[in-house]
Amino acid sequence: MNDIGHPLRLLYIEDNQDDVILGLRTLTKNGFQIEATVAHNQAEFEKAVAETQFDIVLSDYYLPDLNGLTALEYLREKQKSPPPFILVTGTGNEAIASQAISMGADDYVVKEYLKQQLPKAVKNALSRVQRDQERQQLLRLLRQSEERYRTLVESALDGIIVVQNNHIVFANPAFLRLVCFSSLQELSAQDYDALITQEETGKSDQRYDRPYHSLKCADNTKKWIEIVTTDFTWQGQQAKLVQVRDVTRRRLAEEQAQRMNETLRQMNASLQASLLRLEQTKNELAKALEFNDRMLQNISHELRTPLTHIKGYTEILLEGIMGEISDEQREALQIINEKADTLNRQINQILTLQTLNAEDFELRPIDLELLVRSVIQDFQPTAQKHNITFQLHIAEDDILYCSGDEERLQESLNNIIDNAIKFSPEGGIVTVQLRSVESDFLWLTISDQGIGVPTDQLERIFDRFYQVDSSMSRRFRGFGVGLALAKQIIEGHGGRIWAESTNIPGEGTAIQIMLPALKEVR
Amino acid sequence: MANEKILIIDDDPLVIRLAELIIKNINLQPLSALKGEDGIEVAIKERPALIILDLMMPEMNGWETLSQIRKTECIQDTPVIILTARVGATGDLIGTQNKPHYEAFLPKPFSMQEMRDKINEILNRAP
């Protein structure tokens, strides 16, 4: 009859042994297995209670040194969960009995009807205990369950909030940290739709179904969040459960990527524009080159055709084909012919200057000494007219060969010697020196005794169409093409050419030329 | 030999006159035409020993004329000297790729001697 699983530990507070026997026998007859302890007085009662945890206490009211109620009180004070207490009273003591009940006793039994009432009372008391225990157990399980769910929500790193009527009625610690409010009360006071607003996208690239939201924090800063909202019932009412994730860093990274993208796009656009401009420039250059070519062809034709006439008819006259001519006429015609030749040379020089490429050179081993001597020979007549003499200093023991285009080199030397003679005073000396330097270079110097190129123009005399500004040069103007052409040719041979002078008139100008030497002559 | 004919085709009458004087001076007979088409007609009719041909002419230019000459059977093998100012830095004719065959060229301006020598050279005559 009892489900405790062990004999009932019973404390019987009664000093009358007969009553004890009666009580115990009643219970055992009703199927209870009892392990009874009897306390006849206060001392025994206290000892018994100290030593044993009883399952049930039965107590008579009248004892010599204690009454049932004090025992009840004692038990309730001393023990957290005192065993069920049944008071045994005599008839007519209902007042005491009801007092006992109100003090926490489970039941009372009247002595006269002990045999009928006691078993039921014990049974009920035990049932109650069991029910209590079961309820405790349930409560414990419930608490554990609640504990687990609460921990989940409180430990979650995402914010979890409950929104009702546009106010936050619950927020987990993660959300409070996120939003920097110190308490839920402050948070609840805000309007939810003021705190969390969806970003105006309007862009076609919706991020799947989770557009960015902005979260307004307690310090008025904004964070970017992602939210997931669902409807549910919270404490019996409609509410929204909102999960909030801080995606500020991701958003900023996205924005930066977008900016970089934009920058790259712009760079690309300007690169494209540059490419286009380059293309255009290329086309313009091509057109300019073409124009240049055509112009040159035009020029050459337009200039040379009249020259053809001048030279042609002059020669015909000189040959006497149109009749005999006098000596004076002969002289005049020769001058005309000479000048036509000069003009022709100039035209050729300009054209050469504009069109010469180093690739056009035909390279052969050249005896530079021989070439220099030959050029000087060619200019003797012109030099003699002004009493100008040449002084040659050629290092006879050196090997003076170079690899070059003979015609072009001759042209260069012609121009330089021509210049030297032009700027020499009457009776002056043009000095020509040729030697080799360490067998690596040939070094040619042509100097005059003229007024000398001003030192600040020494480089510019090699520019195209540049004319040294001096009254003396006005007589021999020319197009300013000779030296430029010489430079182009010398440099095209891998050589160098430059001019030296002092600012002292009479010390003239020295043109220095270096050309790579030919070490082996086949 | 005294009657060997030389045809000169050039749109510039002054040049024609020059050439005629030079040709007569070396005892040859000059013929002339101011235009390419006319020149070809004269060539077909007179069968000259040599043709001197200017390149830059309006209407039918030198190359076209030369091309036509090379295609016309009876005058196909006539030696031709090209006359032109279109000479570049190297002393070579500019733009001569894929052009019909010519024996020599005389750059303008030419001297009498140069023209004489060229003619004599081509006709294998003593200078």
Image: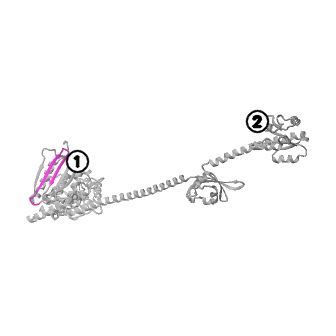
- Going by the numbered disc 1, the residue's amino acid type is Leu
Q: Quadrant of the C terminus of chain A?
A: top left
In the image, residue A166 lies in the stretch drawn in magenta: no
Name the residue at 76% across, 36% down.
A51
Q: Residues within 10 Å of mark 1 (few under 14, many from 20)?
A: few
Q: Which residues are magenta?
A: A425-446
Residue A290: which quarter of the image? bottom left
Q: Secondary structure at mark 2?
A: helix
Mainly helix, strand or loop, the magenta region?
strand
On screen, residue A397 above or below A460:
above
- Observer-nearest of A227 and A449: A227
Residue A351: which quarter of the image? bottom left
Q: Is residue A223 left or right of residue A422?
A: right
Residue A352: which quarter of the image? bottom left
Q: Which residue is mark 2?
A: A51
Q: Could you tell me which chain the residue with mark 2 belongs to? A: A
**Label 2–label 1 contact, CB within 8 A:** no
- Going by the numbered disc 2, the residue's amino acid type is Glu
Q: Is residue A235 left or right of residue B112?
A: right
Q: Is residue A149 visible?
A: yes
